[in-house]
Structures are given as C-alpha cells and as structure tokens.
Amino acid sequence: MIGNLKAYLAPYAQGLDLRAYRQQVLASNIANADTPYYKARDFDFKAAYATAMGQREESGHLALVRTNPGHLPMTAGGALDAVNLQYRTEHQSAVDGNTVDMDVERAQIADNALQYQILSQFMTNKLQGLRSAIASNQGG
C-alpha cells in the first residue's frame, strides 16, 4: 500500500522538489545581484520535470548520470538529478559583468512561488481525498 501511495503522489513530490530547488537558484541570483562577474542561473522546469518523470517511468527510480567513468556510482538523488542548470541569457550588460536582472528575477521567483503553492494544494487535495475514502470505507 505504501508503495502505491508513493507512486500515486510521485508527480506532485517531484514537482515540489524541482520548484523548491528552482526557488533556491533564483534566490541565489538575487543574493548575488551585486557580485561582480556573477552569471545568473536557471533551468527549464518543464524539461527537468519531463526528464524526471520519464526516467521514473522507465526504471521505477531515477538514475544518476556519471559524466566520467572515474566517478563513483551513487544511489538516485530524486528529481534534482534531472536538472540541467544553465546560465540565463543576458538581457542587459552591466559594467561589472554581472548578468542578474532584478526585474526578471523578481518575476520568476513570484511565478515559481505561485506554482509551488498550486502543486502543494493539489497534493493536499489528493491526500484529503484518500483520507475521505479511508474514512468512508471504515464506517461501512
């Protein structure tokens, strides 16, 4: 039963993990807005989510990718293995080489927070539905 529950909630858990990580990446960009030569980072959530869910569907778990045969094999680390963190495209040049655009970062962090809240509510609704089904099953 627990395995089925884990699989049932996996899409939401994967999404929440990726949204939380993206929030950290965006917050790091904002924190480094005044750091000379800092390059803003981000990742494509849709691509990372699709990769995470595709890998999970194929093998039942996520596998880490080793970029060098000398790297030690490890166990799966979750949805974050699917993240391809990249430098954000520069919108305007800064004298100090910093590529953080605070307007872009604020908009992205607000959108990401909203998406996290929506996913969290979906997961809560799923759990409430399960709780109701269990309660109705015990009463009859």
Image (spheres, helix red, strand yellow):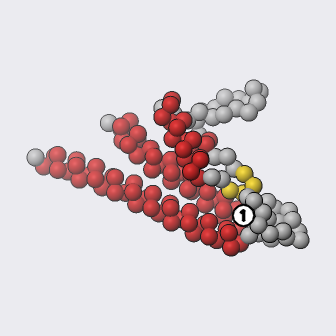
6 is higher (above) or lower (below) than 58? below
Foreground pick, 54 / 18: 54
Work out which residue is located at the far right of the displayed protein and give it.
95
The residue at 56%/63% (across/down) is 112
111 is higher (above) or lower (below) than 1? below
Residue 59 image point, x, y percent: 51, 29
Left of 68 or right of it: where is 52? left
Image quarter (top left, top right, bottom left or bottom right) of the N terminus: top left
Left of 66 or right of it: where is 94? right
Q: Secondary structure at mark 1?
A: helix
The residue at 22%/47% (across/down) is 134
Q: How many numbered circles are shown?
A: 1
The residue at 62%/41% (across/down) is 81
Please tell me how crowded label 1 is: few (under 14), some (14-19), or many (20+) other residues with Cα within 10 Å: many
Q: Quadrant of residue 6?
A: top left
Residue 133 image point, x, y percent: 22, 49
Work out which residue is located at the far left of the displayed protein and give it.
140
Q: Which residue is mark 1?
A: 29
Residue 23 image point, x, y percent: 61, 60
Q: Quadrant of residue 32?
A: bottom right
Foreground pick, 74 / 19: 19
The residue at 50%/31% (across/down) is 58
17 is higher (above) or lower (below) than 3? below
What is the three-letter code of the residue carrying label 1? Asn
Left of 132 or right of it: where is 97? right
Q: Is residue 43 visible?
A: yes
Residue 26 image point, x, y percent: 66, 62
Work out which residue is located at the far bottom of the displayed protein and give it.
103
